[in-house]
Image (tube, grey):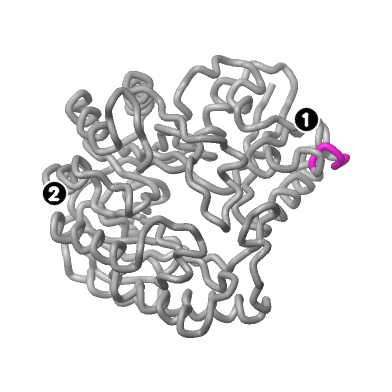
Amino acid sequence: MSVETITLGCRLNFAESETIRRLATAEDDWVVVNSCAVTNEAVRQTRQAIRRSHRERPNARILVTGCAAELDPQAFEVMPEVDRVIGNDSKIGSLGGDARVAPAGFLGHVRSFVAVQTGCDHRCTFCSIWQARGPSRSLSFDVVREAVERELQRGAKEIVLTGVDITSYGREGMGLGELCQRLLAAIPALTRLRLSSLDSIEIDDALFELIAGDPRLMPHFHLSLQAGDDMILKRMKRRHSRAQAVATIERIKKARTDATIGADLIAGFPTETEDMALNSLKLLDDCDIVAAHVFPFSPRPNTPAERMPQLAREVVKARAGRLRAAAAERRSRWLDSLIGSTQPVLIENNAKGHSDSFAPITIAGTSRGETGRARVTGRDGDHLSAVWA
């Protein structure tokens, strides 16, 4: 029996895929395609992955799960390559094993993703993931602690807490900040803790205290900002204003001077004017964003944004391209600014790793799991080169 997992989309999917692979007890050969539905392109890539898997492993059975399969199971059930379609709530136990665990795994790397919650209680007008994942549900501290300890015992050097909306974490009277504080206090071996995407308006005081006071929390924070114009944010049904986003990042950087910022941004949202688009473009500078994930707006079925007046596709693509180009230029300047500096580094694979601030760094001759301080000597594309200091 062999189980191969093919994962599209978010870090939560990666954690779930690794857990499925590790716990599987089925006797047949399976390919599990863990799908994404965040954009139309993600759904297309899911179909492409299914067909490619069938060509490459014609004797294996194919199971499709994940958000795309949850939202439109019939679309995958009718595909001749597909043997089974499973919803999100059943995916962990779909091929046997105990499903009562926190999804976790590092897929051959030394950085391991551990899920602390799933689902979302918000209703952003562009998003269908809440329909696929259901309401927000948080895992207990003990379950999360056990998962973190297990991943460290398996060789992980860095833990990334992930979920659909981790800043909505709430269990046993704890928010995300206190959860992180308790994990770091309870697990001395946890020397590197990182957080996946955060909703800026939900960052609690306990998390700000941790940002300021504990170097074991890695200083790169990726925020779900989505836009830099107040009217577009309102039409997206986001719960923060532009000014609040800027203020949050200023507070992070005041608390931790070496903090770096990443962000998700959508270009070409319905009704977006050129001035509104320029407000999002200016947000790159105003929030000092060095790692932007830019998405051209993609109307998802059964969402309010799908029913809004749409922009021409060429306008959407052009604005996304402009935003990506500006983000790439900012990132290039940031990487250049690190040349000559000394950075804490974790090597992950093939002599490549990341600094604490999540700059990609290559140190020749190094092995997976090595850590230390490195002097940055140059740059090759998006990777810095360095030597141990």
Q: State which tag comes first along the sequence, 1 or 2.
A: 1
x and y percentages locating residue 54 in the rendered image: 80, 41
Q: Which residues are magenta?
A: 76-80
- Image point 31% across, 39% down: which residue? 158
Q: Quadrant of the C terminus?
A: bottom left
Identify residue for label 2.
212
Q: Is residue 280 visible?
A: yes
**What residue is rendered at 53% in x and 81% in y?**
273
Helix, strand or loop status at disc 2: helix
* Residue at 45% across, 25% down: 102
Main SS of the magenta part reads loop
Foreground pick, 324 / 365: 324
Residue 268: x percent and y percent? 56, 73
Left-right relation of 235 to 49: left
Q: Position of residue 51 (x, y in %)?
A: 79, 47
Residue type marked 1: Arg
Q: Residue at x 49, y 41 (%)?
A: 120
Question: Residue 84 got which mark?
Answer: 1
User: Is the residue 343 above or below the residue 81 in the image?
Assistant: below
Q: Quadrant of residue 200?
A: bottom left
Marks 1/2 in contact by CB < 8 Å: the verdict is no
Residue nearest the viewer, comparing 160 with 286 = 286
In this image, 39 relative to 326: left or right?
Answer: right
In the figure, is residue 80 to the left or right of 85?
right
Extreme residue toward the left, this view: 213
Give the amino acid at mark 2: Ala
